[in-house]
Amino acid sequence: MDKLEDILAGCKRRERQSQEKLYRQFYPVLFALCKNFFEDKHDIVTAINNGMMKVFKNLDQFDSQKGEFFNWMYTTVRNAALTMLRDRKTQSFVYDEIKENMFFEARENPFEKLEYDDIEIYLNRLPLATRRVCCLFYLDGFSVKEITESLAISEGTVKWHLSESRSRLKIIFEKSL
């Protein structure tokens, strides 16, 4: 198996074979990431492809002194998926606007003691809109305000989805014990 550094060097030289190796190496984790935002496989793959095109195009901007390549690529693909969501005129569901005074308390992260495969199983049991907000908050570390800006929804709606995800996950966790 080729070293990541060698693959990245080939990608910087715009070698298709290196780009394909990089794409295939990270496809499973990127698929799982984009599945948090889309249900349709075509949309998931489109988001991955859009993100990877940005990775290939902006590879010269990656600075290993600032962090790991995986984190940079993951963030780039996640942002491409969020851009795809924002750019859509009609989404496959509607966020109901929730009043700002709805109660939400961010307690401990419900996923911190779970394995990745378990997290994916539990997340897939949540409605798509709630899953999106939950992933951005608990897994990607976005603040409520950042989620509001990323998904173009109100702060109250974000808080409601976080509260809803906690309620639903509590039931799911109790059933699985």
Image (cartoon, rainbow, N blue to C red):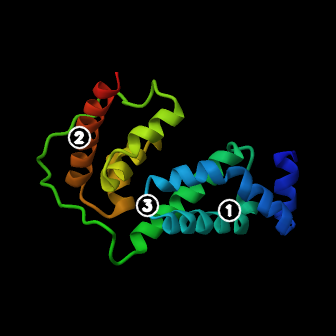
Q: Tag 2 or tag 1, which sits nearer the N-term?
A: 1
Image point (81%, 47%), residue name: 4
User: Which residue corresponds to mark 3?
Assistant: 38
User: Is residue 138 something one can see in this rendering?
Assistant: no
Q: For the residue labelled by badge 1, is the local secondary structure a helix, a strand or a loop?
A: helix
- Quick one: label 3, few (<14), some, or many (20+) residues within 10 Å? many
Position of residue 114 in the picture relative to residue 6 (left or right): left
- Quick one: label 1, few (<14), some, or many (20+) residues within 10 Å? many
Position of residue 70 in the picture relative to residue 177 (left or right): right
Q: Which quadrant of the figure contains the N terminus?
A: top right
User: Which residue corresponds to mark 2?
Assistant: 163
For discs 3 and 2, the disc positioned in front in the rendered view: 3
Image point (52%, 60%), residue name: 79
Image point (31%, 52%), residue name: 127
Q: Amino acid at mark 2?
A: Ser
For discs 1 and 2, the disc positioned in front in the rendered view: 2
Q: Amino acid at mark 3?
A: Phe
Quadrant assignment, res 57: bottom right
